[in-house]
Amino acid sequence: MASFADDLLQQAYHLARKERLNPRQASLRRAVSTAYYALFHLLIDEATAKWGIARQRGMIGRTFEHGKMNSVCQEHMKRFYKTGRPADGVQLNRVAEAFEELQRRRHLADYDNSLIWSRADAIAAIDASAAAFNDWRSIRESEAAQDFLLQLFLPKIK
Amino acid sequence: MLSLETYEMKPKIDPLVEKLIEELSPAVRYIRYEVKPDWNGDPAVLFRVVLSDKATRTKASRRDVTRRVKDQIMERIFLPDLGVFPHFDFRSESEQAKRKDPDWDVR
């Protein structure tokens, strides 16, 4: 069964391709926003799935904050480049980068009425989210990926 | 008109951008940038990168050149710790020719 995050990703593509000619800005902007939320929910689901008591997972999921997750991703990217782009960190860095980038695009799509989106722009954003899904799923059990998930919602550990 | 933040950062960023264009030419045609707070209010710089049509012909070639630009900018411009976080937007020459967006125009 597809997860909620997978459904969102599929819905993003559906919205971006909804009108065959002259796509509506509403469809494209909702598509970009949905591509971000797909990745947002993928990471939250992955983190909360570790919690043993199923009925409490939703509650834990609601503690995740967009701004905090963005800061964690930026910090992760800084570390990645400062340590010389280690080969075993490439995929996780791409996930952090995609999250950070999609969050910016989601903000533009939701609030900046002056920006005109093309279908190519919207599809590129969704492709970035889809690529992050693939990257994440190939490294999800690694120690670095698990540490990353923990950082996404824990207060900064000194 | 340039923002005050962009004006102040120009002496630091311009030479690095020029060198980068030289190295990544002809895939990278030109780069515009703007320094302004991001949606969180944190200092940020947005790079608008115009790529050649040839470099963007396939998804793979586009991915390859955008990866190289991001890596180089992150290492050379961000790492010297300018105190701003870089964001990127990419567009091909023909996309820009069609959209005629002044923020993306060559100077």
Image (tube, coloured by chain):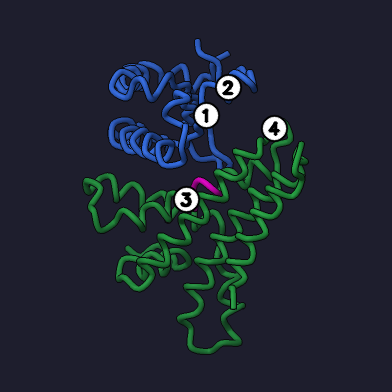
Chain colours: A green, B blue
Q: Residue at x 46, y 41 (%)?
A: B59
**In the image: residue B63, left or right of residue B71:** right
Q: Residue A51: x and y, percent?
A: 48, 83
Distance from label 4 to label 1 (Cα)? 14 Å
Q: Chain of mark 4?
A: A
Q: Which-is-in-front pick, marks 2 and 4?
A: 2
Q: Give the residue pinned by disc 4.
A: A116
Which label is found at residue B96?
A: 2
Crowding around mark 4 (Cα neighbors within 10 Å: few <14, some 14 to 19, many 20+) is few
Distance from label 3 to label 4 (Cα)? 21 Å
Secondary-structure class at tag 4? loop
- Asked if disc 2 and disc 4 are in contact, CB closer than 8 Å, the reply is no
Q: Residue A5: x and y, percent?
A: 59, 66
Q: Residue at x 61, y 70 (%)?
A: A62
Q: Give the residue pinned by disc 1.
A: B91
Three-letter amino acid code at the position of disc 3: Ala
- Asked if disc 2 and disc 1 are in contact, CB closer than 8 Å, the reply is yes
Vertical placement of A135 versus B80: above or below? below
Q: Give the residue pinned by disc 3.
A: A98
Q: Chain of mark 1?
A: B
Magenta-highlighted residues: A98-102
Q: Residue at x 49, y 32 (%)?
A: B90
Three-letter amino acid code at the position of disc 2: Gln
Asked if badge 3 and badge 1 are on a common chain, one would say no
**In the image: residue A70, left or right of residue A83:** right
Asked if badge 4 and badge 1 are on a common chain, one would say no
Crowding around mark 3 (Cα neighbors within 10 Å: few <14, some 14 to 19, many 20+) is many
Q: Which one is earlier in the sequence, the residue at label 2 or at label 1?
A: 1
Q: Which-is-in-front pick, marks 3 and 2?
A: 2
Asked if badge 2 and badge 4 are on a common chain, one would say no
